[in-house]
Image (cartoon, helix red, strand yellow):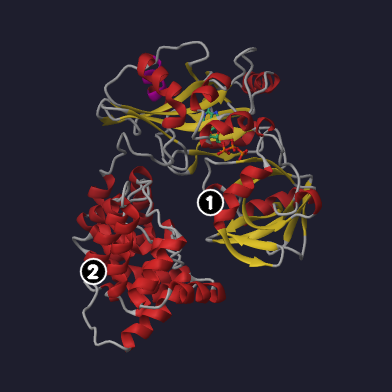
């Protein structure tokens, strides 16, 4: 297949804003991929599955050099153009098009070639890698048309801008290969949430419904975890989960999937990041205290003070997720306890279809409890509302966040907020939001970004919910610092507008506020009063943030 066929789809997709339109375009195109299932990754600007953390690792500088080399235009001119139009994809398009008009070059760029070179880029590192990478990119650009060059560059810079979200790809696969699209959407979704690999889902979809049903999680790979539904009170919880329920403490730590594939143990966050290196202490504890050749455990890892033994809130241990140096010292200063609450795979077989209480029994059999190292979540099974209420109050008294109520016979459904478990916690006004812009400070803070425009999600769009300038700290030991947020945001800057910058929506923060009110100043139509950033959420992705529906609900609270 010629790469130009991909370009046509990219262009059509970027001209269509409607989800349904995109689904039609993609459904038609997907039928053509056939045995090249891996090309499906290119539709999202990648060459590997979503669970795979490898990146192209290409700097803006390298792209500028490659454009210059392939087009014969000087580096200075490329930089100048880039300054003017702010998009290297378009710079490449213009210069490569110009070059093509002046040569008799006509060979067609094949998808296979693009895919191969992009894959090579990802696997090239060490000595001489920059030159090799430059060769791979220039080779592609030299055989590319202007438009092809634009999309190659955007792919390399992780900025494809054609908007193929998970849901759109899922719907398109359903439409391309099945008559009963509605029913298949859920089945495809579940298969995807287990493997996080659209190529595998695509191959199975071609084979049919039963092949999709057979998709299973794979130890050693990250997976999407099951999430709870938030309820207002116990009555609602019992209505959703059944009369007799399992009640557990809701720990204030962070979610870790512990995966042993028979050879090694890996730890993943709910955003599918591999955090094994940062938590070697967890790996040793698991190795010594969990029986079994292979397994996947779901757990909450909670920090505690090594001197007093008292548990610490998430903010206090969040440094352990993101720090890549001094790890041994952090392990000593901020030790953690693993609270295991579910098992999804055991000794070669999935356990997700087993009723919850049976999964719990299996956990009880295979885990050796060690004080302040590894334990099972505190649980009791009951249909007595008074007893559950007392358990809830006691949990709050000892400082837990609330309780989780779980359906005792439900299976495990990865990736979804399903009613197989719900959470009850005291009402606090806080939301996870993404930073989409920021403003430089003045005076003492001149030169640094000090106030942040935060947004919620509306489908694949982001809507502003306010500007936050307080809550961040000076010292790392006190929580998330200005410096850290600045370091995270600087490489994400897309555009500067005086003292304001627009950034790619990547950095997620928890924000507390007094109340939510209507406001014409922000694109959501709402604004938080007295917002404060409590902490950075490195383990969350943009799909975890509050939606516009959540914001409306919050604003509705005020009127009740
Ligand atoms: P909120 O967004 O309301 O602050 P949250 O940030 O903790 O809540 P939620 O997804 O709403 O996130 O709550 C579910 C999380 O609670 C899980 O992802 C898990 O990390 C944590 N958790 C703590 N204890 C348990 C438990 N016993 N069983 C399941 N999850 C638990």
Q: Who's the residue at 32% across and 38% down the image?
A: 217
Q: Looking at the image, is 208 positioned above or below residue 471?
A: below
* Quarter of the figure that contains the N terminus: bottom left
Label 1 crowd bin: few (<14), some (14–19), many (20+), radius 10 Å: some
Image point (35%, 61%), residue name:
181
Q: Which of marks 1 and 2 is nearer the N terminus?
A: 2
Q: Is residue 139 left or right of residue 446?
A: left
Residue 516 appears left or right of 82: right
Helix, strand or loop at mark 1: helix
Q: Name the residue under label 1.
A: 542
Residue 32 — which label? 2
Query: Is label 1 in contact with label 2 (beta carbons under 8 Å)?
Result: no
The quarter of the displayed image where residue 166 is located:
bottom left
- How far, Cα to Cα, is label 1 from label 2? 31 Å
Residue 63: which quarter of the image? bottom left
Tally of numbered tags: 2
Is disc 1's CB within 8 Å of ligand 1? no
As for residue 361 lying within the magenta part, the answer is yes
Q: Which percent across, then down, holds residue 77?
A: 47, 77
The span shown in magenta is 359-364
Q: Measured from the top left, where is residue 360 in percent x and y?
A: 42, 22
Q: Is residue 180 visible?
A: no
Residue at point 42%, 31% (across, down): 277
Tell me the crowding category of disc 2: few under 14, some 14 to 19, or many 20 or more residues within 10 angstroms, Cα based: few
Residue 373, position as x, y percentages in the image: 49, 16
Q: Quadrant of residue 144?
A: bottom left
Which residue is rendered at x = 54% and y = 41% of the image?
538
Which of labels 1 and 2 is toward the front? 1
Question: Regarding mark 2 in the picture, which secondary structure is present there?
Answer: helix
Nearest the viewer among 454 and 422 is 454
């Amino acid at each position: 297949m010629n790469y130009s066929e991909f370009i046509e789809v990219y262009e059509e997709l970027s001209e269509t804003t409607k989800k349904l339109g995109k689904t039609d375009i993609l459904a038609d195109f997907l039928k053509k991929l056939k045995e090249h299932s891996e090309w499906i990754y290119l539709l999202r600007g990648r060459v590997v599955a979503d669970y795979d953390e490898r990146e192209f690792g290409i700097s803006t500088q390298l792209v500028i050099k490659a454009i210059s080399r392939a087009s014969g235009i000087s580096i200075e001119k490329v930089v100048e153009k880039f300054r003017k139009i702010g998009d290297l994809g378009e710079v490449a398009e213009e210069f490569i098009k110009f070059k093509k008009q002046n040569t008799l070059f006509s060979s067609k760029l094949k998808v296979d070639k693009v895919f191969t070179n992009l894959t090579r880029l990802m696997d090239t590192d060490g000595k001489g890698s920059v030159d090799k990478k430059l060769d791979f990119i220039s080779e592609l650009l030299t055989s590319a048309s202007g438009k092809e060059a634009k999309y190659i560059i955007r792919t390399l810079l992780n900025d494809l801008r054609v908007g193929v979200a998970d849901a759109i790809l899922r719907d398109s696969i359903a439409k391309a290969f099945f008559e009963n699209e509605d029913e298949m959407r859920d089945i495809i979704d579940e298969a995807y949430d287990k493997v996080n690999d659209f190529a595998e889902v695509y191959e199975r979809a071609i084979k049919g419904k039963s092949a999709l049903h057979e998709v299973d999680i794979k130890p050693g790979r990250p997976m999407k975890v099951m999430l709870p539904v938030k309820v207002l009170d116990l009555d609602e919880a019992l209505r959703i989960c059944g009369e007799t329920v399992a009640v557990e403490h809701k720990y204030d730590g962070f979610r870790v999937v512990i995966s042993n594939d028979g050879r090694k143990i890996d730890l993943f966050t709910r955003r599918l990041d591999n955090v094994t290196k940062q938590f070697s202490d967890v790996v040793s504890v698991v190795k010594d205290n969990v029986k079994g050749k292979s397994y996947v455990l779901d757990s909450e890892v909670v920090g505690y003070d090594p001197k007093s033994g008292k548990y610490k809130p998430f903010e206090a241990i969040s440094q352990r997720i993101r720090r890549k140096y001094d790890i041994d010292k952090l392990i000593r200063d901020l030790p953690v306890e693993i609270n295991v609450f579910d098992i999804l795979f055991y000794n070669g077989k999935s356990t997700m279809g087993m009723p919850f209480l049976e999964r719990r029994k299996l956990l009880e059999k295979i885990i050796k409890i060690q004080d302040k190292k590894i334990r099972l979540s505190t649980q009791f099974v009951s249909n007595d509302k008074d007893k559950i209420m007392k358990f809830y109050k006691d949990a709050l008294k000892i400082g837990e966040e609330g309780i989780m109520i779980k359906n005792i016979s439900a299976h495990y459904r990865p990736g979804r907020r399903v009613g197989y478990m719900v959470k009850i916690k005291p009402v606090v006004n806080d939301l996870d939001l993404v930073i989409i812009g920021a403003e430089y400070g003045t005076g003492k803070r001149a030169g640094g970004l000090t106030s942040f425009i935060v947004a919620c999600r509306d489908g694949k769009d982001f809507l502003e919910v306010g500007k936050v300038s307080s809550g961040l700290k000076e010292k790392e030991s006190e929580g998330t610092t200005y410096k850290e947020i600045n370091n995270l945001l600087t490489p994400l800057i897309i555009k500067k507008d005086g003292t304001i910058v627009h950034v790619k929506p990547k950095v997620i923060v928890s924000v507390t506020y007094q109340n939510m009110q209507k406001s014409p100043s922000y694109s959501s139509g709402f604004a938080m009063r007295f917002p404060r950033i409590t902490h950075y959420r490195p383990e969350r992705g943009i799909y975890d943030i509050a939606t516009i529906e959540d914001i409306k609900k919050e604003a509705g609270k005020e009127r009740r």
